[in-house]
Amino acid sequence: MTPEEKFQLIKRNTEEIVTEKELKEVIEKKKKPVVYLGTAITGKPHVAYFFPAIKMADFLKAGFKVKLLLADLHGALDGTPWDLLEKRYQYYAKIMPIMLRAIGADAKDFEVIKGSDFQKKENYQFDILKMSTEVNINDCKRAAAEVVKFGANPKLSGLLYPIMQSLDEIYLKVDIQYGGTDQRKIFMFARENLPKIGYTRQIEIMTPMIPGLMGKKMSASDSKSKIDLADDEKTVQEKINSAYCEPGIIKDNGILAFTKYVLMTLKADKGEKLIIERPGKFGGNLEFETYDELENAYTTKKLHPLDLKNTVTKEINKLLEPLRNQKTEIQKLAKQAYP
């Protein structure tokens, strides 16, 4: 794979790269660059997590070392009970590698890292204090606003969140931090403030947020907005059937977004088409090689929402099969982590 091919693979399905020039330089100069995705272990992972799993697979294909940070202390800073941190870490550590395998990723250069394993060390804690003398309360609150649940009476813990996330880039020894667009303010906070305490700024890559089933952001705390990784086939069907999916409407359509960023991406990688099965009396099957073709059929109302929903249900159930194969252990961990 040429440097340009690697760049284009990493760029696909991204919203923003800060900066593309820096990314190209890293790809050209480093034999094995390092990227990390951090996730606070708060709510239960859901099917939208297949999107970052695919992006991590893209980095792996491009020859990167990929680190998945399971940020247990960040979870506590955002309201997760301290006595559940280890249980939630165990749950995430179990299911995330299965999701990578479910999409066919080669995980030999993939590593799961527990945040508290390095964030409690003396140098890291000293750097928290050091950065806290360079930033103000408004900087921290503004940076974390889309990630931390501040409420009417914000806690000090939420203000530490962006400081620690910035330092994670340094202590994980990465070239790139990857996340959703909801992380943008923290990413820019890191680029602005790490140089103030003697560190170099890293590359930041962001992908879009997938809308939930109800036409808003998919939320781990709203069971109606998401499909849980432990949902059975019947539950998946019921949730998809009740999802917001207005004929011809693209905006806030979680079914279309999941189709674009997950299903069509996986099909493209396998050289397959997405087949919409329909009875002959309704025109027979439809086949789509690209998402643009599918979206055009949907906006012109040649593709009915129910036919799309039936196909998405079938494809999601296929993705969940590897998790269902370990259903007993996963459900046990889930009950302990989310009592």
Image (cartoon, rainbow, N blue to C red):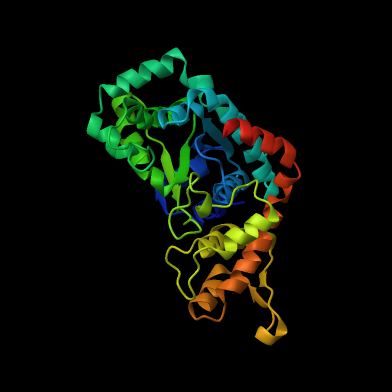
x 54%, y 20%: residue: 117
Q: From this view, report whether residue 149 is shown above or below residue 309.
A: above
x 57%, y 45%: residue: 56
Q: From this view, report whether residue 150 is shown above or below residue 283.
A: above
Q: Residue furthest top?
A: 122
For residue 110, say whether it is visible.
no
x 69%, y 48%: residue: 102
Number of residue marks: 0
x 41%, y 32%: residue: 78
- Determine whether, in the image, residue 149 is placed left or right of residue 45: left
- Determine whether, in the image, residue 59 is placed left or right of residue 234: left
- Whole-percent x and y of residue 268? 63, 62
Q: From this view, report whether residue 236 is shown above or below residue 181.
A: below
Q: Quadrant of residue 59?
A: top right
For residue 263, say whether it is visible.
yes
118 or 169, nearer to the observer: 118
- Determine whether, in the image, residue 113 is placed left or right of residue 232: left
- Whole-percent x and y of residue 192? 30, 35
- Whole-percent x and y of residue 238? 61, 60
Q: Residue furthest front?
A: 339
- Whole-percent x and y of residue 39? 50, 37
Query: Which of the image's four quarters has the C terminus?
Result: top right
